[in-house]
Image: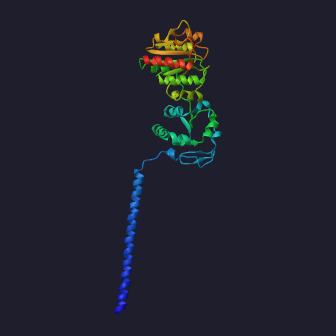
Amino acid sequence: MKKNKQVNSKKLNSKVNSKTNTKENSKKNQKSSGKSLKKDSKKDFNSKPKSNLRKWSHKNTPKSDIIIKDKEVIKTPISKITIPSENLIYGRHASLACMKNANRVLNHIYITQSFIDKHHEEFDAIIHEQMINENIIKVVTRNDINHTIGEDSVHNGIMCDVKPLLELDISDLIIKSKLTDNYAIAILDEAMDPHNIGAILRSASAFGIKGVLMPKRNSPTNTATLAKSASGALEVVDVIRIGNMKNTLEQLKENNFWIIGLSAGDHSTSLKDTRLDGKIAFVFGAEGKGLRDLTEKNCDTISHIPINRSMESLNLSNAAAVTFYEWYTRS
C-alpha cells in the first residue's frame, strides 16, 4: 500500500510540475512576444521616412516599361508619348527650376535611375516644398528620353512635360517697374537663334534684368532648346511677346523708360559714358543684321561696347551679358 501511495504521489507531482512549467513557458513567450511588439512599434514610430525615390526602380523590368511610386508597371513605352516642343523641358537646371515655379503646371516628370541615385535629396526636397503630386513622376530609361528628344541632347536624365506659362502683357511689366527706382529690361529686335535667346535670359537672370521682350513674329517660341539654353531662367525672367516695335517703345517712354539701343555705329556713345540709372530698356538687334533703322530711330540714345579693334563685334548673347553686367555694377 505504501509503495502504491508513493507511486501515485510521484505521478501527481510530475503532473503539477508539467503544468507549472507550461504556465511559466507561456508567460515567458508572452513576455518575449510583447517585447518584440514593443521593439517593432518603436521602430515604426521612431524611424524616419526614407526618400520615395530610393524605392523606385526599373532594374528588374523591361526597358520599355515605366515604373511609378508604388512599383506599378505601365505597359506603354514612353517612346509612344509625343510631347510638343513648347511643353517640353529637359536638363537638370531647367527641369528643377520649372518644378520650383509655382506658376508652372506640370503634367509629367520623367527621370532615370541614374538621376535618382545622384540627385534624390534635392529632387525630394523640391517635391515636398512645392507639394508636387508624386503620381506624375515616372522612372524611365535613358534610351526612352533619347528617343523623345534626340540622342545628341544633354538631358542629365530628367525631362518634364509641362503646360506653357501664361503670357504676360507689357502693361504687367510697367506696373512692376513702378515698385522700384532702378528697373531694367531687354528688347530683342527680331533675334532668331533660340540658343542665343536662352543665353540672354540666363544672363538677364544673373544680373537682375526683369524682363525680355520679343516680337510675336520673327522670333522663336519658348521651345525646349530655348529653355535648356536658359538653364532655368525662363522660370524667373518675364518673357513678353510684343506686336509693333515702334508702339512698344513709345509706350515705354510714356512710362519713364530710357531707351538705349546697342549698335557699333560711329555715332554711338560708349556704354561706360551712358546713363544707366532709373528705368532702362536695352534694345538689341538680330544676329548679323543688328538694329533695324526704324527701331534705331525710336531709341533715346545709341551705345556701343568698347572692344579691341582686332574684333569687329561680339556675339549677341555676349553683348547682352556685358551690357547687363555694366548695368548691374552701377545699379
Query: In the picture provided, is 272 more to the left or to the right than 31?
Result: right
User: Which residue, as the protein is rendered here, is positioned at the far bottom?
Assistant: 1
Residue 289 image point, x, y percent: 61, 14
Residue 267 image point, x, y percent: 54, 6
Is residue 98 positioned above or below 116 on the image?
above
Quarter of the figure that contains the C terminus: top left
Q: Is residue 239 visible?
A: no
Residue for point 56% across, 27% down: 229
Front position in the image: 35 or 251: 35
Front position in the image: 286 or 129: 286
Is residue 293 positioned above or below 324 on the image?
above
User: Which residue, as the protein is rendered here, is positioned at the far left?
Assistant: 2
Residue for point 55% across, 16% down: 284
Is residue 246 positioned above or below 235 on the image?
above
Q: Is residue 273 visible?
A: yes
Residue for point 53% across, 41% down: 116
Residue 105 image point, x, y percent: 53, 34
User: Which residue, as the protein is rendered here, is positioned at the far front?
Assistant: 310
Label total for image = 0
Residue for point 53% across, 27% down: 234
Corner quadrant of residue 216: top right
Is residue 27 positioned above or below 42 on the image?
below
Quarter of the figure that contains the N terminus: bottom left
Q: Please name the colour scheme applied to the rendered image.
A: rainbow
Residue 58 image point, x, y percent: 58, 46
